[in-house]
Amino acid sequence: MKKTWKHASLEKVEHTDMQVTTRDGHPIPLRLYRPKNIENKKLPVLIFYHGGGFVIGSVKGYHNLLSALCDMNQCMVASMDYRLAPKHPYPVPMQDTLDVTEWLLKNADHILAENKFVFAGDSAGGNLAAVNAHAFSRQYKDRIKGQLLICPTTDRNEPPKPSYIENAKVLPLTAGMMDWFGDNYTKNAVDINDPGLY
């Protein structure tokens, strides 16, 4: 049977699990992927923030995709299991990603990374990628080389945009589900209007 790109990538990539301590002392799991054929060489880094509406999702659930991104681009891929709502609503998930991202930027030599970073993510992860790129755009402007935002969540303000209304009942993610995820992440109107959120 012919191997799929997913399985081929899994065989060509290795990963290392570690932890980074956040500002409030919480350990956040961090997984680093590297191509097996490149040893002891600094690589550019794709930081991938997983999706899931800030409520579900994990690095483990994205393992095949992250392995493929690593293999196909011959780069390092870094991804973290930030804390999730509703137990940890905004701003905790955002702060977790900011803390881990800053650690990666400051410790490039330690993890054999080039000072070339791309921030990527899908859905809620696309939001976090954009927020992190914006947060570090001045201090690390020479290191951040781009963003890859896949259907990012970028606006919850009222009234909803026309596309939101037009696609309100389209599966797999309806407007009602989007509202549920958003309400679990942001607990009040002050959160929704926080410029650090979107």
Image (cartoon, rainbow, N blue to C red):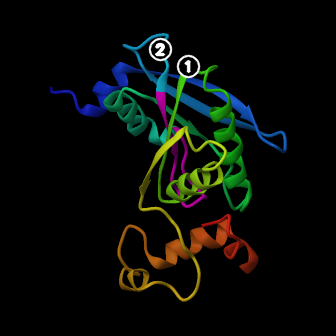
Residue 46 place in picture, x, y as percent: 47, 37
Residue 90 place in picture, x, y as percent: 71, 62
* Residue at mark 2: 41
Q: Are marks 2 and 1 in contact (CB under 8 Å)?
A: yes
Nearer to the camera, 51 or 72: 72
Seen in the image, is 72 located left or right of residue 194?
left
Q: Residue at x 73, y 60 (%)?
A: 91
Q: Is residue 64 above or below residue 181?
A: above
Structural crowding at the residue carrying mark 1, measured as other residues with C-alpha within 10 Å and reported as few (<14), some (14–19) or many (≥20): some
- Amino acid under disc 2: Lys
Quarter the C terminus occupies? bottom right
* Residue at mark 1: 112
- Queried whether the magenta region covers residue 152, the answer comes back as no
Residue interval drawn in magenta: 44-59
Seen in the image, is 170 located left or right of residue 86?
left
- Count the marks: 2
Q: Residue at x 31, y 33 (%)?
A: 6
Residue 70 place in picture, x, y as percent: 40, 30
Which mark is first along the chain, 1 or 2? 2
Report the magenta stretch's main SS: loop
- Queried whether the magenta region covers residue 49, the answer comes back as yes
Q: CA distance from mark 2 to mark 1?
A: 6 Å
Structural crowding at the residue carrying mark 2, measured as other residues with C-alpha within 10 Å and reported as few (<14), some (14–19) or many (≥20): few
Residue 97 place in picture, x, y as percent: 65, 47
Give the residue furthest to the left: 1
- Under tag 2, what secondary structure? loop
Give the residue furthest to the right: 24
- Under tag 1, what secondary structure? loop
